[in-house]
Image (tube, rainbow, N blue to C red):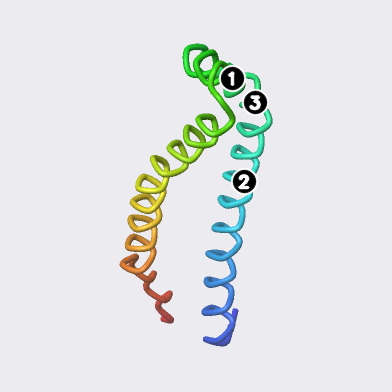
Amino acid sequence: MTSRPLDLLTSGLLDSVFCRMRILAILALVALLTAALAPPAAAQGCAMCYSSSAQQSAGAQQALNLGIIVLIIPPVLLFAGVMITAFRRREEPDPPEIG
């Protein structure tokens, strides 16, 4: 049973890549199913905000919509910053030892 060192290295790396791809595929499927089932829950909205906005002029409605966008920007930036930091500081896996 003689195998070349390059074969061992390549097979170990490919197994790791395929394992990560399977995990990503499962996570993508879960995210897709969650997104598909979420619209009925997300569509309920805040009745008080909707009714008060419906009674306002077009300018006030635009101001409310702009305020919502302005309020969502900081959490999105914080989330993106944490994810970028985590991605940059992740540890690279050790290559399989040939022996």
Q: Residue at x 65, y 19 (%)?
A: 40
Labelled pair 1, 3 in contact (Cβ < 8 Å): yes
Read off the residue under disc 2.
Answer: 28
Three-letter code for the amino acid on which mark 1 is drawn? Ala
Q: Is residue 27 above or below residue 80?
A: above
Q: Secondary structure at mark 3?
A: helix
Please tell me which of labels 2 and 1 falls first in the chain.
2
Q: Residue at x 52, y 79 (%)?
A: 9
Please tell me which of labels 2 and 3 falls first in the chain.
2
Residue 39: quadrant of the picture: top right
Q: Residue at x 57, y 65 (%)?
A: 17
Q: Is residue 3 above or below residue 88?
A: below
Measure the alpha-carbon separation of dots 1 and 3. Answer: 5 Å
Q: What label sits on residue 39 in the rendered view?
A: 3
Q: Secondary structure at mark 1?
A: helix
Q: Is residue 45 left or right of residue 82?
A: right
Residue 67: quadrant of the picture: top left
Q: Residue at x 55, y 16 (%)?
A: 55
Front label number (2 vs 3) = 3
Residue 41: quadrant of the picture: top right
Q: Is residue 69 left or right of residue 54?
A: left
User: How dense is the environment of label 2, judged by Cα within 10 Å: few (below 14), some, or many (20 and up)?
Assistant: few
Three-letter code for the amino acid on which mark 3 is drawn? Pro
The quadrant of the picture occupied by the N terminus is bottom right
Q: What label sits on residue 41 in the rendered view?
A: 1
